[in-house]
Image (cartoon, rainbow, N blue to C red):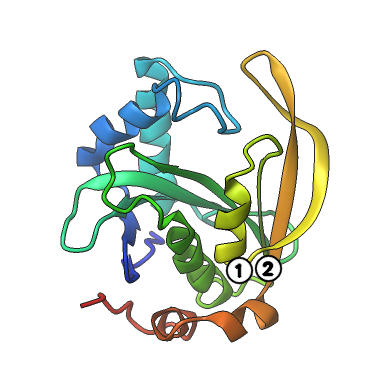
Amino acid sequence: MTHIPELHGEHLWLRELRATDLAAFERIHTHRLLTRYLGIDRMDARQAQDAFAQCLAQPYTHPRRRHTLAICAPGGDTMVGTMGLLVEDYGRNAMLTGLVLLPDAPVRGHGHEAGRLLMAHGFGPLGLHRIWAGHRADHTRMRDVMLAAGLQPEATLRELFHTQGLWHDVTTYAALAHEWRRSATPVEQTILTGGHSLQAV
């Protein structure tokens, strides 16, 4: 079993998914607007339930490649969004995936922090060298999120994925461990060194 420890930041924290998160997960993945810019199509309820079951099984796979985590607000335990890390089969690379926050989430405006917490865990305990992420080229608001997470622009991948009946270009960003570490906050430094995540007070 390969559980990720709780990762606490200033404005939000991350934890493994639990069975009680199904309603929030289903709300996200069946929502027309919340799935608009994801790399997957909007699901029906049954598809969302099947996808959720696969996410719950992730900590029991070896080696673990997929990490889908719940985003929660400080002082609370209710899932208000998701964030993922997909470790690639070659090299020491991974991709940040699936950042989604519910419309009423109290942590809106701080999504980049979820990425930074996962990157600290990736560059630290997971021993990754390079982490990248992307967004649909027409989802321009995501550029600021990527930069705030410490990711640097790289390229545009033409027609990378097909959703809603169309092919979409994806703008990519990446960070290297030795460069990203220099911008890490004290809490992120603790995660990088494999220490226990500190809950912000």
**Above or below, 60 relative to 191:** above
Tag 2 residue: 175
Res. 67 in view: no
Tag 2 and tag 1, C-beta contact below 8 Å: yes
Disc 2, SS: strand
Front residue of 38/138: it is 138
Residue 100 locus on image (x, y percent): 44, 42
Q: Which amino acid is tagged 2?
A: Ala
> Which residue is found at the position 81% from the left and 44% from the top?
156
Res. 143 in view: yes
Relative horizontal placement of residue 153, taking residue 74 as reference (left or right)? right
Dividing the image into 4 quarters, which one contains the C terminus? bottom left
Relative horizontal placement of residue 57, taking residue 155 as reference (left or right)? left
Real-space Cα separation, disc 2 to disc 1, in angstroms: 7 Å
Disc 1, SS: loop
Q: Which mark is residue 190?
A: none
